[in-house]
Image (cartoon, rainbow, N blue to C red):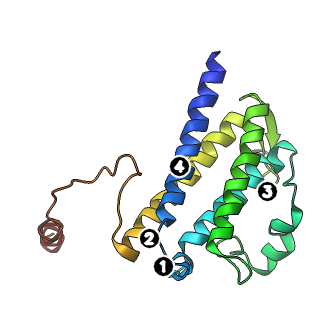
Amino acid sequence: MGRNDAMKTILKNHLQACRNDLVWKLSGLSERDLRMPQTPTGLNLAGIVKHMATVEIGYFGDTFGRPWPHPDEVISDEQFETDPQADWYATEEETAESVLDFYRRVWIFADETIDTHALDAQGTVPHWRAEKAAVSLQQIMVHVIVDLSRHVGQADIVREGIDGQVGLNTRNPNIPEDQDWESYLAKLRSLANNT
């Protein structure tokens, strides 16, 4: 395995780990909880997943000349013009499970681009300014991992607010098991109030 192949494997593994962590954050919640806006700007768990599916189609599809094979499943430019947040929520016709299924199918599509292109393969991001639009697959993989990681962090906070579930991932919660959270929060409040 060459250096570029090893790097591609590392990046692909990180991408998939982030995908899995996002999906895990939705497990066990009701349809209502998955759809319910949790912030003043409407952030919701099903919407985060739908947004990331749209992101991956764009960056691993359109950028490398591979349109999503089911155009009726993607949000059109006209829909985005009417509703710039169209990829941030499940519609009446969609369920949270159908959004998750869509995202899993997008993984296969995106991974085909990753598997069939070299890290230095060139693409063009259609919605970026012309002077920045030319990119390599490696740049796009890093870009998507960073974007996805940010949204997984949002999902962490949203999920904790819904039912208190916390943790890094299924293998390693990365949270102290014997923490007295009430005392800890009291200490932090005291520190904040005394500044």
Location of residue 21 in the rendering, given as x and y in whole percent from the top left corner? 49, 53
Direction from residue 81 to residue 38 in the image, left or right: left
Q: Earlier in the sequence, mark 1 or mark 3?
A: 1
Which residue lies at the image location 53% right of the left edge and 49% below the top edge? 18
- Using the numbered discs, state the Cα–Cα distance from disc 1 to disc 4 in whole angstroms: 22 Å
Q: Which residue is mark 4?
A: 18
Location of residue 175 in the rendering, given as x and y in whole percent from the top left corner? 27, 54
In this view, the residue in front, 103 or 132, is 103
| 110 over 29 or under it: above or below | above
Q: Are marks 3 and 4 in contact (CB under 8 Å)?
A: no
Q: Which residue is mark 2?
A: 158
Direction from residue 175 to residue 55 in the image, left or right: right
Q: Which residue is mark 1?
A: 39
Q: Earlier in the sequence, mark 2 or mark 4?
A: 4
| 4 over 45 or under it: above or below | above
Q: Which residue is mark 3?
A: 127
Please state which amino acid type lies under the numbered disc 4. Answer: Cys
